[in-house]
Amino acid sequence: MSSDTAKHHELLSVLKEARGKADGSFEQAVTDAFEHVFEHLDRLNTHVSAGGPEGEERPLKPDESPTLR
């Protein structure tokens, strides 16, 4: 299992365990999960497909919007 998949399972497990607790653990689990999601989005926004038959990736230009495509 890839480390990223393991991380996803861990985040889900912690979220499920923290449900209904009033000790702040659920809020922390949600924050941790969103931080991981934002890491994924940051990686996706760093490289976008140039399209075409080759489908190569290229870095964003300095003035280019980081909107996912």
Image (tube, rainbow, N blue to C red):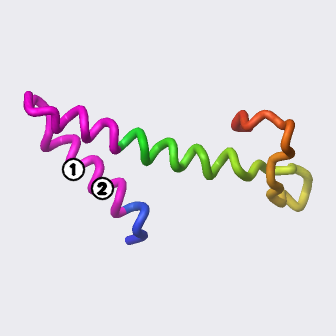
Residue 14 in picture, x, y percent from top left? 20, 47
Q: Residues within 10 Å of mark 2 (few under 14, many from 20)?
A: few
Please name the residue that numbered disc 2 is placed on. 9
Q: Residues within 10 Å of mark 1 (few under 14, many from 20)?
A: few
Q: Assign the magenta stretch its main secondary structure.
A: helix
Q: Is residue 22 magenta?
A: yes
Q: Is residue 46 magenta?
A: no
Q: Secondary structure at mark 2?
A: helix
From the viewer's perspective, is 21 left or right of 7? left
How far apart are the two marked residues, 1 and 2, measured between alpha carbons? 6 Å
- Residue 29: quarter of image: top left
Please name the residue that numbered disc 1 is placed on. 13
From the viewer's perspective, is 2 left or right of 9? right
- Residue 21: quarter of image: top left
Q: Secondary structure at mark 1?
A: helix
Q: Quadrant of the N terminus?
A: bottom left
Magenta segment boundaries in residue numbering: 6-32
Task: Please state the total of marks drawn on the protein image.
Answer: 2
